[in-house]
Image: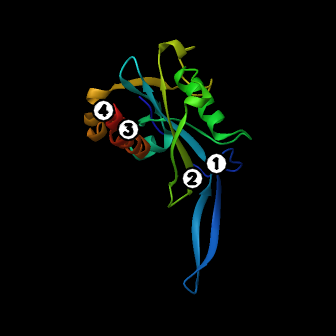
Amino acid sequence: MSKINSVRKLEDPKFVQAVEINYSYKGSIRRWEAVVVHDSVAVLLWHKEKNAFILVKQLRATVLNKNPNNGMMYELCAGIVDKNKPLKEIAKEEVLEECGYDIPLESLKKISSFYTSVGISGNYQTLYYAECDESMKVNEGGGLEDEDIEVVYIPLEHAKEFMFDESYQKTTGVLMSFYWFFDTITQTR
């Protein structure tokens, strides 16, 4: 069982920076506490042979801090933009690291870019869609050595039920991308 042992202020943060934003709006000076973070990419991955979405499942300490009974999250394959590379290349690397599929760069189709966590960080995320099959599988995925990522297949026939079953903790990106798939991809098949 996972549990939170302590929560303390960061002295030398590695990925985030707490800031105070002072700004003018409608004639008054205002103040906002925020966190500066990297932008990110995410990929809705579709397995053609399994007729299933590929998600990742991992423990998120922030969720565990809010829900001590369960910090596990179902998420899109995703990663931060911390390298000086095109976004598609970063997305391709994340699919390989987290899910184990070596997808062709040109198979990544941009769905949209948008802001997330707007009340605290204003992270800018670019969402892609890609299809894969077993011929592209080169390893088991699981992330980098300090990550513990489980690759999860959600069959199409269970996807809508999964979307609304709150016992599966998931991100809004999962819901948005599934809606996009049902509205866009299934309409063309």
Q: Residue at position x 44%, y 32% from top?
A: 2
Does the CB distance between marks 2 and 1 fall below 8 Å?
Answer: yes
* Secondary structure at numbered mark 1: loop
Q: Which residue is mark 3?
A: 181
Q: In the image as oriented, which residue stretches furthest toward the right? A: 84
Q: Residue 124: give x, y in percent of width and height.
A: 57, 52
Q: Quadrant of residue 81?
A: top right
Query: In the image, which is nearer the foreground, mark 3 or mark 4?
Result: 3
Residue nearest the observer in this picture, 55 or 87:
87
> Alpha carbon of mark 3 to alpha carbon of mark 2: how far?
23 Å
Mark 2 Cα shell of 10 Å, populated few (<14), some (14-19), many (≥20): some
Does the CB distance between marks 3 and 4 fall below 8 Å?
Answer: yes
Question: Is 118 left, or right, of 168 in this rendering?
Answer: right
The label on residue 159 is 4
Q: In the image as oriented, which residue stretches furthest toward the bottom? A: 27
> Alpha carbon of mark 2 to alpha carbon of mark 1: how far?
7 Å
Q: Which residue is mark 2?
A: 123
Query: In the image, which is nearer the foreground, mark 3 or mark 2?
Result: 3
Q: Residue 173: give x, y in percent of width and height.
A: 44, 44
Residue nearest the observer in this picture, 55 or 28:
55
Q: Sequence order check: which comes first, mark 3 or mark 2? A: 2
Q: Quadrant of residue 176?
A: top left
Q: In the image, what residue type sits under mark 4?
A: Ala
* Secondary structure at numbered mark 2: strand
Q: Which residue is mark 1?
A: 38
Q: Residue at position x 55%, y 48% from top?
A: 125
Q: In the image, what residue type sits under mark 1?
A: His
Mark 1 Cα shell of 10 Å, populated few (<14), some (14-19), many (≥20): some
Q: Sequence order check: which comes first, mark 3 or mark 4? A: 4
